[in-house]
């Protein structure tokens, strides 16, 4: 698909040659432009030949001379101009296969696109790459990438992912390493399938590829209540979580001695499941997988500690509720307890049970409007409730079940205030800008 132009920068090269919104870029020097990566890679040259389809259907061929790396001044409708590369695996733990029916269609897309991995940090499997994809990754040096490994034993990984090609993971990671591509890896831990000896072999094998393998994140499998006709799985229990923490810490101790870096990290959820405090900041090094739920709690607690000295002793009478999923309660309780020392402030937690997804889904980011409306009922009319922005579709006030923030306000009568989940934003939302 050609690249639809939506904006042309004034006085830019593109503006000077007469390009306009509504035109489409077909090729550069005869090479198809399938995404923003192609565009930035091929547009760098000093001499270019563009093939353009004008909004009226006419085809222009334009020759350009410019400085090396000088941009043309174009903005496009999307970052990908062709179709997203979808996943052909049948993972036994695939979260999309566990989604309830009748959610918006985009939530059922199985993304396994290496371009999204490079651009946004999405985890991919490598098992769906074609040779031309490999060549593009290596030629353009798309680094870092985020790789779902799960297991290095070929038969175990193939079983977990329902794809025989998945068993080539060692060769694939070695190819990336030899090309100088940095990768962050994750292991979705399924008790009884890829734990124990399989897990240890996976960690050992990935560590051999350091520094190409720059981090190993271990996250527990997430199970909803919608697993009919799917393989039987279970989540970590408390004793298994404790044992896993001990294993991770023993590997960290060893890797810090050998590599000067922790390398392997456990998700916050593992520590919460085990009833253990989150590790100190040093455990996470440079927080390579915070977007994967590894270290986000520690960052929040430490950021709050830095803000603590600025907190007032007393404020005017104020009552505020913080809406949260159940898994984050232990982290929030520490924050709420400290803030409630401020005279005049009455701060409460409002945990919401995830009925919509069911199963063991307790994270805040997967809360739906239906469950929030049910939890609020008519008990919070006129009350101020802080609602984490992470539950909304990016840039919009829409939740996973297409219920809007306004829908919740109307149903509950509560005064809902979206808030970014960081210490300064939270304190400002509660105490005002001049705290």
Image (tube, rainbow, N blue to C red):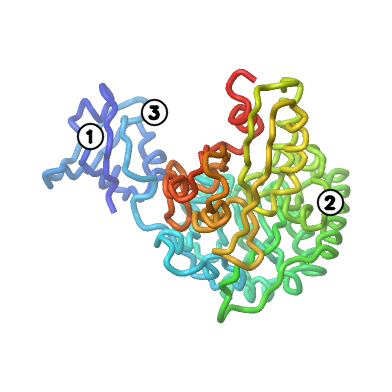
Residue 63: image tag? 1
Q: Residues within 10 Å of mark 2 (few under 14, many from 20)?
A: some
Q: Position of residue 306 (x, y in %)?
A: 74, 26
Between circles 1 and 2, the one closer to the viewer is 2
Q: Would you name the residue on which mark 3 appears?
A: 68
Judged left or right of residue 73, residue 314 is right
Residues under labels 3 and 2: Cα distance? Answer: 54 Å
Lower sequence index among marks 1 and 2: 1
Q: Position of residue 400 (x, y in %)?
A: 48, 55
Q: Position of residue 45 (x, y in %)?
A: 36, 34
Residue in view at x 71 percent, y 72 percent: 234
Does residue 319 sit above or below 108 in this rendering?
A: above
Does the rendering let one see residue 268? yes
Does residue 193 sit above or below 409 in this rendering?
A: below
Q: Nearer the viewer, residue 102 or 176?
A: 102
Between circles 3 and 2, the one closer to the viewer is 2
């Amino acid at each position: 698909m050609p690249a639809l132009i939506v904006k042309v920068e004034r006085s830019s090269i593109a503006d000077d040659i007469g390009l306009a919104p509504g035109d489409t870029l077909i090729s550069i020097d005869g090479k198809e432009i399938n995404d923003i990566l192609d565009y930035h890679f091929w547009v760098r040259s000093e001499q270019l030949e563009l093939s353009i389809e004008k909004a009226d259907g006419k085809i222009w061929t334009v020759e350009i001379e410019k400085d090396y790396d000088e941009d043309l001044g174009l903005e496009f409708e999307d970052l990908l101009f062709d179709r997203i590369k979808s996943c052909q695996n049948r993972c036994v733990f695939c979260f999309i296969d566990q989604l309830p029916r009748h959610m918006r269609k985009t939530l059922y897309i199985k993304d396994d696109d290496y371009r999204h991995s490079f651009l946004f940090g999405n985890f991919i499997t490598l098992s769906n790459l074609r040779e031309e994809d490999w060549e593009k990754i290596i030629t353009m040096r798309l680094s870092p990438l985020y790789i779902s490994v799960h297991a290095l034993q070929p038969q175990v990984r193939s079983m977990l992912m329902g794809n025989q090609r998945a068993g080539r993971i060692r060769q694939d990671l070695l190819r990336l390493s030899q090309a100088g591509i940095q990768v962050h890896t994750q292991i979705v831990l399924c008790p009884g399938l890829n734990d124990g000896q399989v897990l240890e072999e996976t960690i050992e094998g990935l560590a051999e590829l350091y520094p190409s393998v720059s981090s190993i994140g271990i996250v527990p499998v997430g199970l909803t209540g919608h697993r009919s006709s799917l393989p039987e799985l279970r989540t970590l229990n408390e004793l298994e979580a404790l044992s896993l923490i001990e294993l991770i810490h023993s590997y960290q101790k060893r890797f810090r001695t050998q590599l000067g870096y922790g390398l392997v990290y456990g998700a916050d959820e593992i520590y919460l499941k085990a009833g253990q405090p989150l590790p100190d900041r040093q455990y996470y090094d440079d927080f390579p997988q915070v977007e994967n739920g590894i270290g986000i709690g520690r960052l929040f607690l430490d950021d709050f500690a830095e803000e603590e000295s600025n907190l007032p002793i007393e404020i005017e009478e104020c009552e505020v509720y913080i809406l949260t999923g159940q898994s984050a309660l232990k982290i929030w309780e520490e924050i709420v307890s400290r803030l409630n020392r401020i005279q005049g402030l009455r701060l409460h937690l409002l945990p919401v049970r995830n009925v919509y997804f069911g199963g063991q889904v307790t994270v805040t980011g997967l809360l739906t409007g239906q469950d929030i409306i049910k939890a609020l009922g008519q008990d919070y009319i006129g009350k101020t409730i802080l609602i984490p922005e992470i539950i909304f579709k990016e840039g919009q006030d829409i939740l996973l079940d297409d219920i809007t923030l306004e829908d919740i306000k109307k149903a509950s009568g509560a005064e809902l205030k979206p808030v970014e989940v960081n210490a300064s934003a939270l304190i400002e939302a509660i105490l005002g800008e001049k705290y």
